[in-house]
Image (cartoon, rainbow, N blue to C red):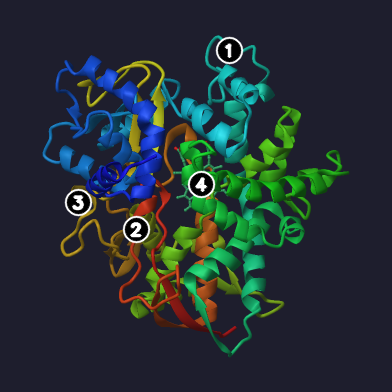
Amino acid sequence: MFDTSTLSSVGALSEALGITPKYLLIGLASCVGLALLSCKFVAATSNRPASPQTLGDPIPGLYNTLQFMFNNYKFMTRAQAALQGSRHSILRFSLGPKTVYLVTGQQNVHAVFGRDLVHDVTNQEQMTRYALPTLYKMNPAEVRRWEADLSGVTKAPIPGTEHVPSHQRLWYNYEHIYAEYLGKPQYMKPLVKRYDDILQQVLNSYPVGEWSTVSVQKLCRDEVTRTLVDTLFGPRLMELSPDFVDRLWAFDEQVFQLVMGLPKWLNSKPAKAHDAYVGPIERWLEVVSAGFDWDAAEAESDWEPRFGGRAVRQLYRWMKETDWRNEVIAATLGALVFAIPTTMWMLMEIIKDPSLLQAIREEVATATTTDPDSGKPVLDHQKLVALPLLQSIWTETLRLRINFNIVHDVKRPVNLDNGRTKIERGALLQVPMMVAHYDETVWGAADHPASEFWAERHIRYAIGERKFVMAGHPAAYFPFGGGANICPGRQLAKHEIFTTVALIVSRFELEVLGWTNPVNGAPSDRAAQSDLRYCGAGAMPPDRDLRIRWKRTC
Ligand code: HEM
């Protein structure tokens, strides 16, 4: 039990850390073990030389750990400040008993994602410790299978593991099937076509010539999400569970807490939301797999109504062949990242600025043809994803709104910082997007600081023609991660999001009504900003909604 003095010191500490007391209490309970270990660790390592830069810890072993976990934005701002003006681009701190190296600088980022270190610096320990038992619901025996697969993630197995049968190579197949069936153009194109068709049907439910009021967040969380789910999984999932999309968003709210692995008795909400989300996927799998003929042509088709697109079907097939339980398959498929916050941001940025909206309409028209039979407009997706202004807005949105700390374990000692920093085995490397994506020296322009959205940041004009040219170095921009684990859905996401924007701007007249608070719908006197609670965890959604009036024109 806490007495009042404990609560007031919790209050003071929470204020200093910028964490709400509730989270601090949960954090204190869960971190106490880590912190004790960490104090021992700090004592053992305090004689180290001051290279690389070390981030001070006001309460050794505790403050940094808590702030990192519960107010990542403040932590990263401190880290940025510590690195500024320092001759180092690597910052060391402790997270519980672990030594963490925050890796910044283009050369270092390039090295961490590069082929040379692919077997030395991996995400596998993070996966087996955090993602597989929580997000993918694997039991200890199932996790041990992954731990036992030492054959690596690349096509060629790590020397000495060539005896592992190829379909039993868990790390390799997991990456490979995603990369193949989500990323390769011949498999991705049918998914994009399906997405376009379904979204058109959804938008056609708004009668031509009639004004109606919609909100951008609600539209994306509802209609656009349904379109995405139908594209990947087919229509049966939502027919069997009409409230599936509500369950998805309820789970989305809890996912960060879930992956933190807090015990259920401390906070049961994340596990409950997870079960409520995975349950319908498991039931759907039972229904669609029953009697499915794996030797028939439909098993190889680009899209069929049971499993939907080929990626999900291929994953299911491999997982069954390698004896995954249905619950684990359902949880793994359910973890497919959805691209919704990026869609919300792009729509908001375009719709709120009438001259940008007009420029995008004109650009989209150049990627639209007319169907000779129906006379209806048809998007040329290949042209669409190459449009310069749309690409600039996409790049700018991802740069500012995707904020993820990519974490890798060091399996063998590595040298970074031009050989000046030796990283020991067992340490953690964190590659934060926030430092690279907001770097003023890379992205800043006169009158347009790096922290600000500027639609034309990645546009150059050559003889009056608009061209897309990324304003900064590619190694300072990695919203999809990098190296062996780079997001396999990145091209699909780009195609789907561009299609959504193009269909909306070209078929609707749009008028802004105002910003609202999505929690209670009340009017807001300011535009949306990134929801900083999501800093370090993925996409930062807008903290305000945009209410608009729209009228379908064709
Ligand atoms: C704007 C949209 C998206 C962004 C910014 C994004 C970003 C990311 C990032 C940062 C990672 C982690 C990479 C790493 O650990 O190095 C990731 C992984 C992943 N993404 Fe995406 N993603 C997006 C959309 C999608 C879509 C639409 C799909 C599929 C339908 C998808 C499927 C995946 C999968 C399966 C992984 C895990 C790969 C693995 O575990 O190795 N993503 N994504």
Q: Decide if residue 37 is on the left or right side of residue 155.
A: left
Q: Quadrant of residue 106?
A: top left
Q: Which is nearer the N-term, disc 3 or disc 4?
A: 4
Give the quarter of the figure containing the N terminus. top left
Q: Is residue 31 above or below residue 359?
A: above
Label 4 CA crowd tier, 10 Å (few <14, some 14–19, many 20+): some
Sequence-earlier tag: 4 or 2: 4
Which residue corresponds to mark 2? 396
Q: Sequence order check: which comes first, mark 3 or mark 1? A: 1
Residue 109 vs 193, above or below: the answer is above
Residue 473 seen in render: no
Q: Secondary structure at mark 1?
A: loop
Which residue, given by chain and number where applicable, does mark 3 sit on? 440
For residue 420, which numbered disc appears in the image? Answer: none
Residue 357 seen anywhere in this rendered image of the structure = yes
Q: Earlier in the sequence, mark 1 or mark 4?
A: 1
Does the closest atom of ligand 1 sit within 8 Å of the Cβ of label 4? no
Give the spatial CA distance, label 1 vs label 2: 43 Å
Q: Which residue is mark 1?
A: 161
